[in-house]
Amino acid sequence: MKYLTLIVIALLSFQSGFGQELSGTELLKKAIKYHDPNGQWSSFNGQLQVVMETPNNPNRHSKIKINLPKDYFCVSATRDTINTEYTVDHGACSIKLNGSEAISEAEQKMYNLSCDRATLYKNYYTYLYGLPMKLKDEGTIIHDAIERRTFKGKEYLVLKVSYDKNVGSDVWFFYFDPETYAMEIYQFYKTDENGKLKKDSGEYILLTETMTINMIKMPKNRAWYYNKDDKYLGTDKLQE
């Protein structure tokens, strides 16, 4: 009996140790397997329809086309009676305002239209809807230590991510369900000149429900809040 007890204790210790030894890279691998089980992201060619809801503003309706193999991106967004369309095709940018490419300098300033903004939208949408797969991109630093952290009453496995200096200076934390490895929250902070987190900076994003697009599980709703005071900023909602 004593021998059997020792075996059970050893097995439990081994299992406990195995859980603790899960590395950042291993956690990311499990999360990608949940969200993109068939490895479809690198060949993604599809359309997303997103409604952005923000306090005291009309909703913004966006149609987003992403074709990664052809290096093509287009977002057409409408709020009230104004429609803007940004296209980045193999790095070449084009802009339309209410369907026309004939845009005056005054209109460019009024609606903040620029190729820099087109690139910003491309990076924004492909990054956020490509998570967690985008964490495999060059210049991404996956920290080895995994933290167990409770957020709003639920315990998560938390992956810390930073970036090479030429990519960015923000530090991100990704919260995964400890059983399914689904990504349910992400959070970022700005850093000071010494690389330390500015605790009163940045935002956290709560992800609820999922939609499967091109066999990839994407968050249906993304609600944004400030870290410093939990102030609600808005929600992006994927539409059928």
Image: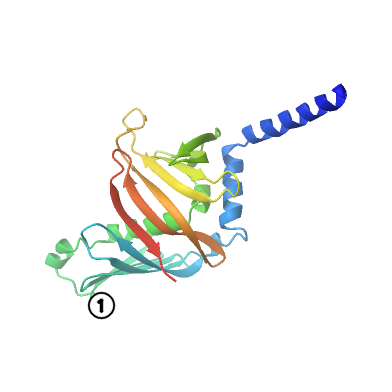
Residue 172, x across and y down, in percent: 42, 41
Residue 41: image quadrant is bottom right
- Left/right placement of residue 61 relative to residue 221 reads left
Residue 229, x across and y down, in percent: 28, 40
Q: Is residue 52 above or below residue 97?
A: above
The residue at 43%/39% (across/down) is 164
Where the C terminus falls, by quadrant?
Answer: bottom left
Residue 201: image quadrant is top left
Residue behind mark 1: 99
Helix, strand or loop at disc 1?
loop
Camera-side residue of 201 and 5:
5
Q: Is residue 101 above or below residue 19?
A: below
Q: Residue furthest bottom?
A: 99
The residue at 58%/41% (across/down) is 25
Residue 170, x across and y down, in percent: 37, 40
The residue at 41%/69% (across/down) is 239
Q: Residue furthest top?
A: 2
The image's colour scheme reads rainbow
Q: Is residue 8 above or below residue 63?
A: above
Residue 173: image quadrant is top left
Residue 105 is at least partly visible in this image: yes
Residue 167 is at least partly visible in this image: no
Local packing at callout 1 (Cα closer than 10 Å; few below 14, some 14-19, many 20+) is: few
